[in-house]
Image (cartoon, helix red, strand yellow):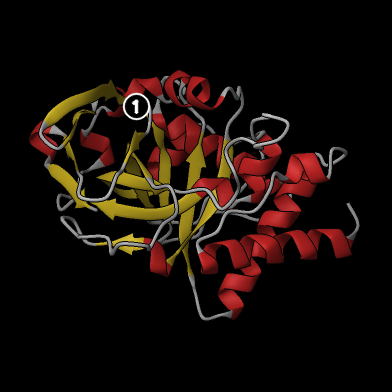
Amino acid sequence: MSPQEVDATALRLFEAERSGVQTGLISLAHPQAGMDDAYRIQAAFVARKMAAGRTRIGWKIGLTSRAMQSALNIDIPDSGVLLDDMLFANGATIPRGRFIQPRVAAEIALVMKTPLQGSEIGVADVLAATDYLLPSLEILDTRILRVDPETRRARTLVDTVSDNAANAGIVLGDFKLDPAASDLRWMGAIVLRDGVVEETGLGAGVLNHPAAGVAWLANRLALYGQSLAAGDIVLSGSFIRPLEALPGSTILADFGPHGIVQVHF
């Protein structure tokens, strides 16, 4: 894609978020677009948001579990940027109209204590660079149509990545956990919508270890001369299928001894 096409597509996404009206599939308008194009669009989209006053607070990793990959018919991870206006307090009520088609997923968030950079990062490196863990919920949204109404074509990874990996919000738990004293593979949650158990899962559902997703992100960023910074919040990826968050609903993730995280719509 040309620089002009990338900028025009990023503007479409920016306006879709502002207006609450979804835009058409990027993969349909630009069938030649590849992953590099998608991340260029994402960067331009995020740059527009930062120019409007937002600041970066971290990263999200998506599509790391079989559950999430099968939900979107996608088979490789993706990543996006977390911004300050995406952060909500535990138990927050999301104003009506804030999102277009919100869904919620349960995740383990890692907060970095030291920078993490390099091209051969592994799980041990991630854990050594982590300050603490937090149970969390991620709010997903899509500025792009899920399915084109005329062709019935579904969005692809190009669409999802361009759309900042469907990134929209994050709700963090109240208890900071020591990564050295926690087995992330066995850290999990029972997730309820309006008091009904809809999903359950364990951290092992994320590439067999949530820190493996963070390692993937660090290694991918290194290809572009980027890295994780101290203080960054990193969502390691969902271990459940995302739940539709209809108006009036409450999503609650019970992480057992690690606390409860919930959000109201």
Please name the amino acid that badge 1 sits on: Ile
Residue 44 screen position, x and y as percent: 70, 64
Q: Is residue 214 above or below residue 151?
A: below
Pick the front one: 210 or 145: 145
Residue at 61% x, 66% y is: 14
Q: Is residue 234 above or below residue 157?
A: below
Q: Secondary structure at mark 1?
A: loop
Q: Quadrant of residue 103?
A: top left
Q: Residues within 10 Å of mark 1 (few under 14, many from 20)?
A: many
Residue at 57% x, 71% y is: 49
Residue 141 screen position, x and y as percent: 46, 49
Residue at which label 1 appears:
240
Q: Quadrant of residue 89?
A: bottom left
Residue at 61% x, 79% y is: 51
Q: Is residue 114 left or right of residue 222?
A: left
Q: Is residue 60 left or right of residue 242?
A: right
Pick the front one: 168 or 80: 168
Residue at 42% x, 34% y is: 211
Picture mark count: 1
- Would residue 239 be visible to someone looking at this image? yes
Residue 213 screen position, x and y as percent: 49, 33
Q: Is residue 118 above or below residue 124?
A: below
Q: Is residue 217 left or right of residue 178?
A: right
Residue 50 screen position, x and y as percent: 57, 74
- Would residue 123 be visible to someone looking at this image? no
